[in-house]
Amino acid sequence: MKHFIILLCALQLISCKSKQEVKTDVKKQPNVVFILTDQWRAQDLGFAGNNQVITPTLNGLSKEAVVFTNAISNIPVCTPARASLMTGKYPLSHGLFYNDKPLKSEENCIAEVYKENGYNTGYIGKWHINGHPQGMKNYKGRQLPVKADRRQGFDYWKVHECTHNYNNSIYYDENDVKHKWEGYDAIAQTKDAIKYMQANKENPFVLFLSYGPPHAPYQTAPQKYKNLYKGMDIKLRPNVPENRAKKAKEDIKGYYAHISALDDCIAALQKEIKDLGIEENTIFVLTSDHGDMLYSHSQVKKQKPWEESINVPFIIKYPAKLKGGTKMTKMFSFPDIMPTLLGMSNLPIPESVQGIDYTGQLLGTEELDVEAALITCPVPFHQWKYKRGGREYRGVRTEKYTYVKDLKGPWLLYDNVKDPYQLNNVAGKAAYADIQADLENKLQTILDKNNDEFLPAEAYMKAWGYQWDGNDNEKKHVH
């Protein structure tokens, strides 16, 4: 009997130790705080060389994090980029190559993988992959709640499908009850994110915080941030034509005001992460779904293949594993985000994912052979519909070059090292013939891998059963 009691106690000790080890292992799983902004181009950050935009928090964060200098939005527009982020797939695979179309509930998304592996999951802010019912006009679908079976693995839920009314901003909770954010929504959403982190600090969590700014309207940031730029003579990029300069300076002041407001929001998040004692084991990411032309090349908004549209901020901080103050120059794009975060979290990557896991590259244990990122517009629409000069295109962005072709053939070729503002299109020039041929091969390799036949837009709209919005399909513009 005595020996049995001793044996039982020993087994209990082993059991307790085993449970403690499991608990410790769970605690080792990193938290993820993912900040997704809307229409913030990579060029407008203090640490990136812009000495007018006021971003002290991000300037400091760049010294604590890895900065990706060549992060590319493959289709630089909201819905397609966000769907690639969630699925790790390219737009012609997940099917969202046009705004306000619905991501299939069957897609295996990033939050679902985290949730299956014991994480708490939360999403706050703009969603924009729920779509709206066929035939619904004037974007009324953006005002509808996202039902529980359409949330792709996120449980905590304070979301609006799409709004840019930052000072009169509504959201729906987990029960589809409508609420209103107090004041400027990014600040209110930040406070809510802080409460979420406080409530979940003892368990691994993944939190997506999706801000609407600095997307237009440009003049709606809180006055204190607009005052920062009130008397500033904005220095424009050399590719902004003189006849657009006045309007560009006015819009950029407001754009910068939104950016500075977000910089303060990020400061509050960083402080709370440190105060909660979870900084070492938290993966913190800042990026944007696409950039903003802001009158460069006399263009506005996004969808275009120029740098201001496709090159986005991407900063990842993970003190436990990544050396701060370093740069990652290798090409990186939206399908790579999901596998990289899962890889950094030691979680399985679904077979459906098309992107690349950069964990080994970031940890210095692997050298990835990635030379080019795809840039594409299968269907031009809305702000860049045919009548406004929109066109179907496929292209590649490498560390040195941008090469793009449309349905008629080669369209753009820039040497971004010699010509950083892309003022000299050398497509078809004899001196660049070999370079162009090499870039064409790189592009075709990516298209072949993705089974992309580069068809006219109508083919993809028909294949996915999509309706055009308004007169997007009216071809009145001659290239």
Image: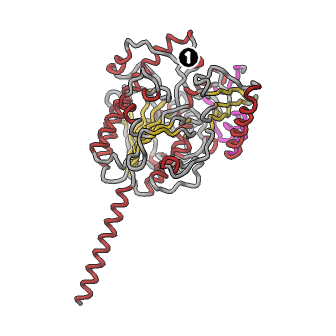
Residue in the foreground of this view, choosing between 148 and 257: 257
Q: Which amino acid type corresponds to the residue marked 1 in the rendered image?
A: Pro
Q: In this view, does 434 lie to the left or right of 96?
A: right
User: Does residue 26 lie above or below 8 as drawn?
Assistant: above
Quadrant hosting residue 378: top right
Please say whether residue 88 is visible from this viewpoint.
yes
Helix, strand or loop under label 1: loop
Q: Image point 33% across, 38% down: which residue? A: 269
Front in this rendered view, residue 264 or 143: 264
Magenta span contains residue 178: no
> The magenta stretch spans which residues?
450-477
Residue 470 sits inside the magenta stretch = yes
The relative height of residue 19 versus residue 443 in the rendered view (above or below) is below
Q: Can residue 208 be seen in this view?
A: no
Q: Which residue is drawn at 29% across and 47% down?
A: 277
Query: From the viewer's perspective, is residue 267 above or below residue 7?
Result: above
Q: Where is residue 389 in the image (x, y as percent from the top left)?
A: 65, 21
Q: In which quarter of the image is residue 25?
A: bottom left
Closer to the camera in the image, 145 or 151:
151
Residue lying at the far left in this picture: please name it.
Answer: 2
Q: In the displayed orientation, state which residue is furthest to the bottom.
A: 1
Identify the residue at horizontal 56%, vertical 16% (top origin).
240
Q: Mark 1 points at which residue?
A: 238
How far across and down, in percent of the image, does residue 15 sit?
Answer: 32, 73
Quadrant housing the N terminus? bottom left
Image spot of residue 453 (x, y percent): 73, 40
Q: Majority secondary structure of the magenta segment?
A: loop
Q: Is residue 304 above or below residue 2?
A: above
